[in-house]
Amino acid sequence: MAKTIVIGGFGPGISSAVAERFGEAGFSVALVGRSAERLDAGVTALASKDVRAAAFPADLADPAALQKLFGQVRAKLGPVTVLHWNVYSGAGGDLLSASLEEIRSVFQVPVVSLLAALQAVLPDLRQQKDAALLVTNGGLGLYDPQMDAQAVAWNAQGLAVANAAKHKLVGLLSAKLKPEGVYVGEVVVTSLVKGTPWANESSTLEPTTVAAKFWELYTRRTEVSALVG
C-alpha cells in the first residue's frame, strides 16, 4: 500500500530534506504551510525527483482548520502514515516583558496545534502499518545552563520553554501510542542548520543530516529522542 507523509510547517532546510528523504523511499508527500508560493515550489522540486507531492496551504496555528486539512490530504493522497511536525513559534522572546497573551501563545503551535493535528490524523495512523509522528525540536529546550544562557542572549526564551514542553509531550505520546503500534520520536537539533531562518555564516549542519536521522528513527522505531548537531 502507498504511504503518505504530511510535512507540517514546510520550508527550506530540515522539512525540505525530510520530504526528499521520505519521497525517495516511495512516500507521497503532503506539504503544509502558510505560503502557497513556497509550497508550490516544493511540489515542483519534488516532482523533478519523481516524488509525488501536493500542496495544502493552511495556518497550522489554527486547530479548527486541521480536520479540514487532513480530509483534503486523504482525498488527494490517501491515508496518512507519517506526520512530521516541523512548526515552531518565536513568541515570548523576553518572558519578563512579554504580555500574558503572548506567553500563552508560546504553547499554541508546539503543543496545542500539534495535539490537534495528531487527534485529527490519529484514525489514519492507527490503521496504517509503520505509522509515526516525527517531531523537529531544538536544543534550547534542553536542561542545560549553556542553552539557557543562549536562549536569553538570542531573545528566544519562549522558544526554549516551548521546546522543553514539546520534548515532554513527545515522551508522553510515545508511551501512550507505542502499544498501538504508532511510533513517536523527535530529533533535537543542537546547532544551526544551513538553509533555515536561523542560519548564519557559521552554520555547519546540513539539513540532509537531520533528515537521515529522522529516517533512522522511523525505520528502527526504538529511540524516542535523538540529538543532532
Image (cartoon, grey):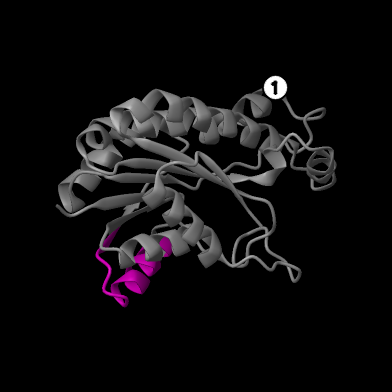
Please name the residue shown 26% across and 74% down the image: 50
Please name the residue shown 52% across and 29% down the image: 171
- Decide which of 97, 25 is in the foreground and name it: 25
User: In the drawing, does residue 108 fall left or right of residue 151?
Assistant: left
Residue 82, magenta (yes or no):
no
Q: Which residues are magenta?
A: 38-54
Please name the residue shown 64% across and 65% down the image: 205
User: In the drawing, does residue 128 fall left or right of residue 214?
Assistant: left
Q: Quadrant of residue 177?
A: top left
List the residue tagged with mark 1: 100
User: In the drawing, does residue 15 fall left or right of residue 49?
Assistant: right
- Decide which of 160, 179 is in the foreground and name it: 179
Position of residue 142 measured from the top left corner of the image (x, y, whole percent):
70, 38
Position of residue 33 measured from the top left corner of the image (x, y, whole percent):
42, 51
- Decide which of 96, 85 is in the foreground and name it: 85
Label 1 crowd (10 A; few <14 / some 14-19 / many >=20): few
Position of residue 55 measured from the top left corner of the image (x, y, whole percent):
31, 57
Q: Quadrant of residue 59?
A: top left
How many numbered callouts? 1
For badge 1, the amino acid type reads: Leu
